[in-house]
Amino acid sequence: MQSIIKNGLILTDSGEKVKADILISDGIISKISENIEADAVEVIDAEGKLVSPGFIDLHIHLREPGGEHKETIETGTKAAAAGGFTAVAAMPNTKPVPDHAEQMNWLQDRIKEKASVRVLPYASITVRQAGKELTDFKKLKEAGAFAFTDDGVGVQSAGMMFEAMKKAAETGASIVAHCEDNSLIYKGALHDGEFAKRQGINGIPSICESVQIARDVLLAEAAGCHYHVCHISTKESVRVVRDAKKAGINVTAEVTPHHLLLCDTDIPGLDTNYKMNPPLRGKEDREALIEGLLDGTIDFIATDHAPHTAEEKAEPLSLAPFGIVGLETAFPLLYTRFVESGEWKLKQLIDFLTAKPAETFGLPFGRLEEGRAADLTILDLEEEKTINPKTFLSKGKNTPFAGYSCKGWPEATIVEGKIVWKRERVNV
């Protein structure tokens, strides 16, 4: 079956926009050329729109099983498609945890049944994410585990993490770490900075994250495994990762849109939509994250999409759960803040959401090239509208960005040549 995208704009390697048609045959990009004439079942007119590789988000929470009141595989992947994402990696802090092959097999079957986009499921490092007993890496990888993480909690024992890294190295798997030393949390709800002090709220210090990264990069060097840092948030953490990379250690890192866009002094009041883990840090931290992303210390952007119910987020700040949603707003927020302002090139932003995560984990997509899977996102870079959580396809409406006016919104999302989401204005 053939389809064709006509009159779209694509980015060259140098970042120049050029007009091109894209022919898709049996889910594969078969030809990219200025003008293609071919018999096609579907014709998509992308006049004036940018056609990008489909976005990849390697850190999201789909909540299923066990948290379906917050999100499901179906609703979360519909939200991903609406945000231009064609592949997402789902964290394992579910109930039950995918900590054995049978549960991973169940999850894979559920993904095939309900997902709108590609879903790469993580398995946990430890049984029930309790930090006491390692899972069977070999069997879980054979069942389709993308990588291993106890995201949501840091692995507290250095010995346990070292054993996990050795197992990962043996099986050719990656260790992906939520870095948090529990002895340094101090029952904090926000960053240990200006805002928390003014409000009399316990703060989470930066060293809570950075000391565990410092421990882990040395363990990863000794174990010889690929070690990836989740949602890096502090200037000290950036320094540790930068030094580790210079030392030749196989460490990579991701950063969220909200940590690039906001710091703790931007919190307007006791609004739980500004409560996430790691918390919004200081101005110097945010600047270090941007610098680290641009110089290659940080490898790519991931949303840490973490949906919660309105009732849960209505709890007092000290009791409300950590986390915000991000799939449906990531690109327009980043495009407006960094590309429209002239700070970044459009090619840089697209790469942070496509080629870079794919390269980091050896994924076979993330590039718009002949012979590649037709995972594509069509973007209207001129459209400007206000973020309205009521319109989200995600069950979660918990965002601090409600009311923000942004440019650069997805028009259609295509996975393996099939349109999985589109705006009404796209002529199909």
Image: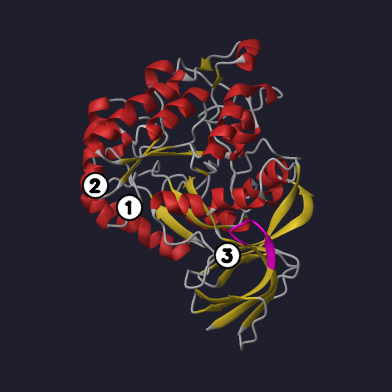
Q: Amino acid at mark 2?
A: Phe
| Residue at mark 3 to residue at mark 1: CA–CA distance | 24 Å
Q: Is residue 372 visible?
A: yes
Binning the other alpha carbons within 10 Å of mark 2 as few (below 14), some (14 to 19) or many (20 upward) gives: many
Quick one: label 1 or label 2, which is nearer the N terminus?
2
93 with respect to 37 (left or right):
left
* Residue 132 higher or lower than 109, as above or below: above
Could you give the CA–CA distance between mark 3 and mark 2, rounded to whole angstroms? 32 Å
Q: Which residues are magenta?
A: 12-18
Residue 366: x %, y % from top left:
50, 59
Q: CA distance from mark 1 to mark 2?
A: 9 Å
Q: Regarding mark 3 in the picture, which secondary structure is present there?
A: strand
The part of the image, by quadrant, that contains residue 381 is: bottom right
- Residue at screen point 70% across, 46% down: 339
Give the label on residue 145, or none: 1
The residue to which callout 2 is attached is 137
Which residue, given by chain and number where applicable, does mark 3 sit on?
Answer: 376
Q: Where in the figure is residue 181, as x and y percent of width and height?
A: 38, 22
